[in-house]
Image: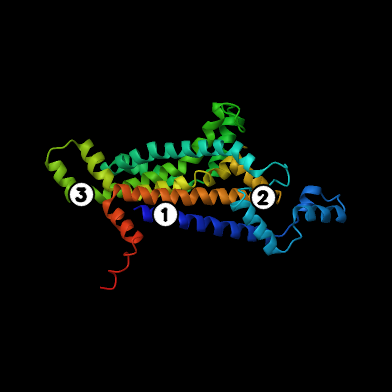
Amino acid sequence: MWKYIVKRLLGLVLVIFCVAIIIFTIMYFVPGDPALTVLGSTSTVEEREAYRESLGLNDPFLVQLGRYLYQTFIQFDLGTSYISKAPVVSEFASRLPRTLALGLICLFVNVVVGIPLGIVCALDRGKVADHLISVLAMVGVAIPGFWLAMLMVQLFSQTLGWLPAMGISSWKSWIMPIIAGSLGGIANNLRTTRSAVLEVMNSDYVITARAKGLEEGKVTYLHMLPNACIPILSQLGGQFGQVIAGTVIIETVFTFPGIGTYMLSGISNRDYPVVRGCVLLLAIFSASAVLLVDLIYGLIDPRIRAQYISYASGKGGKGSGK
């Protein structure tokens, strides 16, 4: 198992390295001039040329790429913002806790609301509650998060005046971002849990557990749910990987001072260090989430753990040709 973990960690490093090269290449060839954005249209050609020279933007592509990779992976320096003149790492340190808090709270709400509702729908299949909750789940999946966010701002902030429309001045500022960021996840978790529980509820081990006289709650949570958790974990793994990326639009609508607004401001201002740093952070978080979910698979299912061990020992494909 440890060999598998080491191999996956090395693969994670390779993925992040490739992402760094790709995002640098994209930002290098994208149209636009950072010097013109920073200095403005009133600056002279000589001033813009001197600014580009000071940033090393006139160097050849491979020279700039090598310098960027060295600073990022050897010096652990993501650069300095062209606009604010602040190190990108320091901006991350101040903004990341807020984005993580928002994303993790949304994920928690997704779990504690979506999974129990999915179990209820599966156990009451075909009944009024199942149809009603399923319809609401379809609506939740169909509604875009940014559209719901703007509707809530219009209703609860501008019309009723109950909640602040932007910022994080009080705990009330978190209510609408959490609702807007959680609705789609709740609906997806509900549908995934319902389907997974329906697949196992008529299995032999469930019938045997009921025949032994176990309470329905124990049958559900000790027999059905553990065996139905693989697709549920896959769904949660994707949501966990989007804890940071999934809040970008929500943060923008509510002017929430997190990583999302920081990245979008970097894109609009052609602030290359900010964009590269944010994309790299998202890649690290998403790849780590996938690795974590894979390891949890091995912990809860011995069959998957045996496949991991076989893969790590190099025996994964020897039996395929027999």
| Residue beneath the point at 69% across and 59% down | 64
Q: Nearer the viewer, mark 3 or mark 1?
A: 1
Q: Residue at x 51, y 58 (%)?
A: 14
Residue under label 1: 6
Dot 2 or dot 1, earlier in sequence:
1
Which residue is disc 3 drawn over?
A: 202
Q: Amino acid at mark 2?
A: Pro
Task: Say if 99 sits above or below 64 in the image.
Answer: above
Q: Which callout, 2 or 3, points to the residue nearer the camera?
A: 2
Q: CA distance from mark 3 to mark 1?
A: 39 Å
Q: Nearer the viewer, residue 53 or 192?
A: 53
On the image, the x and y values in percent for residue 27 come to: 66, 57
Amino acid type, label 1: Val
What is the crowding at mark 1: few (fewer than 14 residues within 10 Å), some, or many (at least 20)?
A: few
User: Where does residue 133 sit, x and y in percent of width and height?
Assistant: 36, 41
Is there a contact, CB below 8 Å, between mark 3 and mark 1?
no
Task: Answer yes or no: is residue 39 visible.
Answer: yes
Rendered image: mark on residue 273: 2
Q: Residue furthest bottom?
A: 321
Quadrant where the C terminus lies? bottom left
Tell whether 284 sits left or right of 110. right
Which secondary structure, mark 3? Answer: loop
Q: Which callout, 3 or 1, points at the residue further toward the start of the chain?
A: 1
Q: Residue at x 53, y 55 (%)?
A: 16
Taking 4 as reference, is 203 left or right?
Answer: left
**Quadrant position of residue 111:** top left
The one nearer the camera, 125 or 64, is 64
x then y, percent, for residue 182? 47, 40
Q: Mark 1: which secondary structure?
A: helix
Residue 247, picture quadrant:
top right
